Amino acid sequence: MFDELMLPDQADLTGPTMDGTATVALRLPWYRSLPLSCVEGVVISIDDGTVDGEGMTISVGDVEHPVADLGELADVEWFVLDRATVRFAKPDGLEPGMHRVALTLTLRIPYAEPEYWPIDFTQTAEHSRTVEFLGKDS
């Protein structure tokens, strides 16, 4: 619905850091805040190569959560105006310059009251943008 808003103009592609990870900032592609438990999938590709999801984390606010554990985080809200940061393994690094970043985010949208559950309504947002990476962050 709001796919183009997911990767802001300043997508803040950073890394890899000393631990071999890189990060990308993203926005919630929905018009209402959602609990992190509604995030059912995160897939990132850089320059047409899909990033390994093993060990991927997402930070909303000051706390970093493993993507694999998001289903348990019904009490952690991702507010519409907040950026989240996804950290992922990038041991081979990134060359300075322009990179094509693609993101697919699958959300489960909890619209109905609990007495009407389960209602299986998901929204998959896909967007890509070319962003500039200036060099290795430390």
Image (spheres, helix red, strand yellow):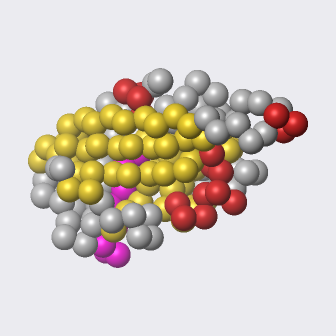
Residue drawn where x is 19% and y is 43% of the image? 100
Q: In this view, does 19 lie above or below 4?
A: below
- Between 56 and 121, the one nearer to me in the picture: 121
Q: Is residue 93 left or right of residue 30?
A: left
Residue drawn where x is 38% and y is 52% of the image? 43
Image quarter of residue 6: top left
Highlighted magenta segment, given as a residue range:
18-25
Residue 104 x, y percent position in the rendering: 39, 43
Indicate yes or no whether the magenta region holds residue 22.
Answer: yes
Can residue 29 be spotted in the picture? yes
In this view, which residue lies farthest toward the right?
115
Q: In this view, does 74 lie above or below 22?
A: above
Q: Is residue 36 left or right of residue 132?
A: right
Residue 37 x, y percent position in the rendering: 65, 51
- Between 52 and 8, the one nearer to me in the picture: 52
- Between 23 and 68, the one nearer to me in the picture: 68
Residue drawn where x is 84% and y is 38% of the image? 114
Residue 134 x, y percent position in the rendering: 18, 50
Indicate yes or no whether the magenta region holds residue 120.
Answer: no
Can residue 78 be spotted in the picture? no
For the stretch drawn in magenta, what is the main secondary structure?
strand
The quadrant of the picture occupied by the C terminus is: bottom left
Residue 117 x, y percent position in the rendering: 78, 39
